[in-house]
Image: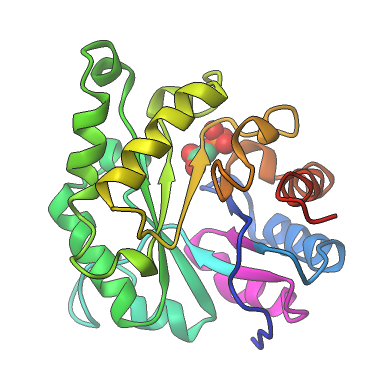
Amino acid sequence: MLYSIGMEAPYVIANWKMRLSLNESQALAAALHTGVPAENGTVVVCPSFPCLTSVAAALTEMSVMLGAQDVSPDELGPFTSEVAASVLAEVGCRFVIVGHSDRRARQGETDKQVEQKLSAALRHGLTPVLCVGETATERKRGETVNVIKRQLGAVPAGKEGRIIVTYEPVWAISPQPPATGDEAAAMLSVINETLKGTAAAIIYGGSVSLQNVTDFVAPKKFAGVLVGADSLKAAEFLAIIAATRRAFAFV
Ligand code: PGA
C-alpha cells in the first residue's frame, strides 16, 4: 500500500469491531476510498485482523489509512492467537487501537499490558490510538479523573507526542447515549494537563454520530473522533468526516 498523505488533524477513526464480514469490509473500504477527499485531515479504518490485507488492497488511493484493533505486547514468537506489531506494519497498518474498553473488560487487559502494547506499536512505527475512559460505576463513585490519570500512566515516558489519546467514557459507548460536549471537554482538560499538552492528538469516542460530532470537534476542542456504530455505512461515515472537517474550518 502506498500512502502520500501525512497525518494531520482532524482525525476520524473508524472502529469496525467484529461487526463486518470480509465481503462487507472490502465493500465499505472501496466505497470510502472513492468518497474521501485526500486532504484536510486523516481518516483511518480499523477492520478485524483477517480483513486487514483485503482492506489494505482496497485503499491504494491514499485517502484512507489502515489501523488494527489490537496488538501483541511481544515481538514475533510462540504466542498463540496474538498478532505482532511488525506484522501489522507489514500488512500496511499505520495505526493501532490500544486499551479499548472491550479489551479491558472482556480480556481483563491491565494498564501494564497497555503500556507494553504501546511500546510494541511504537517500536514498529505504528501510531497507537490509546483509549482511556471510566465505567459507569467509576463515574458514579466520582473516580473519573483518577481513572483517566491512572490509565494515562501507561504512556511510555517521552513518547506522548507519538500517541493519539481517545477519551472514550465506557458509559457513553453505543447503545448508551453519548457524553455531552461539556462532560467530554472537562476530561479533555484533564488529559491535556496530565500529559502537559504533549499528546499527538486527543480525540473523543462514544456514540459519535452526524448529529453530535460537532459537539466534540473544533480547533480548541477535540482533534477528532473514534466512531464505532456510525462508521459502518459509507454514506453516514462520509457525512461525519465532512462535518468534522467543516468544524475544523476546512471546507
Ligand atoms: P460507538 O463505539 O461509536 O458505537 O459508541 C465507539 C468505540 O467503542 O470505539
In which image quadrant can residue 54 be found?
Answer: bottom right
In the image, 127: left or right of 211?
A: left
Q: Quadrant of residue 64?
A: bottom right
Q: Is residue 234 left or right of residue 4?
A: right
Residue 44 counted in the magenta span: yes
Give the camera-side residue of 97 and 157. Answer: 157
Q: Residue furthest top?
A: 140
**Image mark count:** 0
Q: Quadrant of the C terminus?
A: bottom right
Provide residue 145's location: percent of width, then percent of height: 25, 29
Is residue 101 visible in this depiction of the protein? yes
Residue 107: horizontal and vertical position, in percent?
25, 44
Rendered residue at 18%/50% (across/down): 153
The color scheme shown is rainbow
Q: Is residue 139 above or below residue 10?
A: above
Residue stretch in magenta: 43-65
Q: Position of 68 compared to 35: left or right?
A: left
Residue at the image position 51 percent from the left and 59 percent from the top: 48
Closest to the observer, 193 or 138: 193
* Residue plotted at (22% across, 70% down): 158
Query: In the shown orientation, is residue 41 left or right of residue 153?
Result: right
Can you give x and y, in whole percent of width and height, for residue 197 in the image?
Answer: 36, 54
- Which corner quadrant holds the N terminus? bottom right
Image x and y of residue 92, in percent: 54, 80
Q: Is residue 18 magenta?
A: no
From this viewpoint, is residue 84 visible?
no
Q: Using the image, determine if residue 70 lies above or below residue 66.
A: above
In the figure, 178 relative to 21: above or below? above
Question: Could you tell me which residue is drawn at 17 percent across and 78 percent down?
Answer: 78
